[in-house]
Image: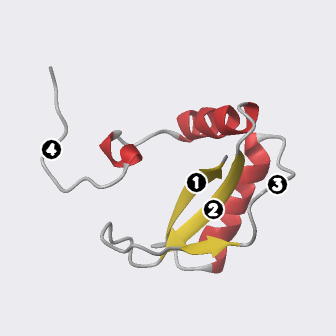
Amino acid sequence: MQTLPKERRYETLSYLPPLSDAQIAKQVQYIITQGFIPAIEFNETSEPTELYWTMWKLPLFGAKTAQEVLSEVQGCRSQYSPMTKPLLSEIA
């Protein structure tokens, strides 16, 4: 069994290997299909110990497709430095 390298892990998704764009789109579509409201948060330092991240705009209440959400992620990246790490969260 292959394991990921030992490093600090804080959140549930930190245990996943890096996801492709198609895999991320499937995760976002699942969030929408389950009736959750996607939200985008970001932090310019991307430190896992940083407790408070900035929310990008408001939660995406009207999002119907994964592409709508991913275009907002791209908007966040383009507004801030490429080093910014957006985080997709959900609101139940």
Q: Which residue is mark 2?
A: 40
Marks 1 and 3, the one that precedes in the sequence? 3
- Amino acid type shown at disc 3: Phe
Q: Which residue is mark 1?
A: 89
Marks 2 and 3, the one that precedes in the sequence? 2
Look at 15% across and 44% down and name the residue there: 5
Q: Which structural element holds mark 4?
A: loop
Up/down of 84 relative to 63, above or below: below
| Location of residue 88 in the rendering, given as x and y in whole percent from the top left corner | 58, 54
Tell me, yes or no, whether the two marked residues, 3 and 4, touch with CB atoms within 8 Å: no
Look at 39% across and 78% down and name the residue there: 45
Disc 1 versus disc 3: distance between alpha carbons? 13 Å
| Location of residue 13 in the rendering, given as x and y in whole percent from the top left corner | 40, 45
Tell me: 49 left or right of 33: left
Look at 49% across and 72% down and name the residue there: 84
| Location of residue 47 in the rendering, given as x and y in whole percent from the top left corner | 33, 72
Label 2 neighbour load within 10 Å: few <14, some 14-19, many 20+: many
Label 1 neighbour load within 10 Å: few <14, some 14-19, many 20+: some
Q: Looking at this rendering, what residue extends furthest in the front direction?
A: 92
Disc 3 versus disc 4: distance between alpha carbons? 37 Å
Marks 3 and 4, the one that precedes in the sequence? 4
Look at 65% across and 70% down and name the residue there: 76
Disc 2 versus disc 3: distance between alpha carbons? 12 Å
Q: Nearer the viewer, residue 84 or 59?
A: 59
Tell me, yes or no, whether the two marked residues, 1 and 3, touch with CB atoms within 8 Å: no
Q: Which residue is mark 4?
A: 5
Q: Which residue is mark 3?
A: 61
Marks 2 and 1, the one that precedes in the sequence? 2
Q: Which structural element holds mark 2?
A: strand
- Amino acid type shown at disc 4: Pro
Of badges 1 and 4, nearer the viewer stands 1
Disc 2 versus disc 1: distance between alpha carbons? 6 Å
